[in-house]
Amino acid sequence: MNGMTNNIPTLAWIWDWNEYDFELHVSKDVYDVFDSHRQYNNKNECGGQLFIDISFNNGLWLTSATLPHPDDKSSKNWVEFNSNRCESEQNLARGNGLVFAGYWHTHPQEIPKLSYQDKISIERFYVMNKEIIRSPIFIIVGTSLCQDGIKAWVYKNEFYSEALKK
């Protein structure tokens, strides 16, 4: 829990969901994880989990994005996270005062979009975990370095809401 010691992370950007009056500050460390795992050339999809620090007095901060794991299964068009690694990472994060927020993964397209497979996975995840997390965040990292090269969605009330970057 960094917020308790006032060690505010370096800000990469803020995602805003106007319809929910919700902002999420994204740390530079999280951006660095995304940027270092873009799906260039013939790489398979990869990804990890997202954790928020709620202890800062200036809003919610996405301070942790876990790294891809060798036990995950993947191809060029899908990734399946190893459940043991997910549970272990969630326990560790919870012990550090962080809150599980959702998942991130890569796409081989420049500007990422939710695919049909993404929507199936998100809806399946939501049904299995809605008692734990009511509005999960899903981030897709594309290959473009432009502002739209990384996008985020919240899944709430069976609706996908894309964030605007500030």
Image: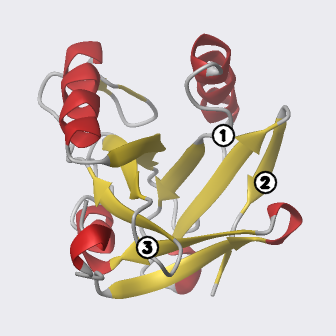
Secondary structure at badge 2 equals strand
Name the amino acid type tagged 2.
Ser
**1 lies left or right of 103:** left
Mark 1 highlights which residue? 115
Mark 3 highlights which residue? 26
**72 lies left or right of 161:** left
**116 lies left or right of 117:** right
Q: CA distance from mark 3 to mark 2?
A: 17 Å
Q: Quadrant of residue 45?
A: top left
Q: Quadrant of residue 47?
A: top left
**96 lies left or right of 164:** left
Res. 113 visible in picture: no
Q: Return the x and y of residue 14 as percentages of the image width and height.
A: 55, 80
Q: Return the x and y of residue 70 as percentages of the image width and height.
A: 11, 29
Name the amino acid type tagged 1.
Ser
Name the amino acid type tagged 3.
Val
Q: Is residue 125 above or below residue 164?
A: above
Mark 2 in CB contact with mark 1 (< 8 angstroms): no
Mark 2 highlights which residue? 161
Q: Nearer the viewer, mark 3 or mark 1?
A: 3
Q: CA distance from mark 3 to mark 1?
A: 23 Å
Frontmost residue, 38 versus 20: 20
Residue placed at 27% from the left, 81% from the top?
Answer: 6
Frontmost residue, 103 versus 92: 92
Q: Who comes first in sequence, dot 3 or dot 2? A: 3
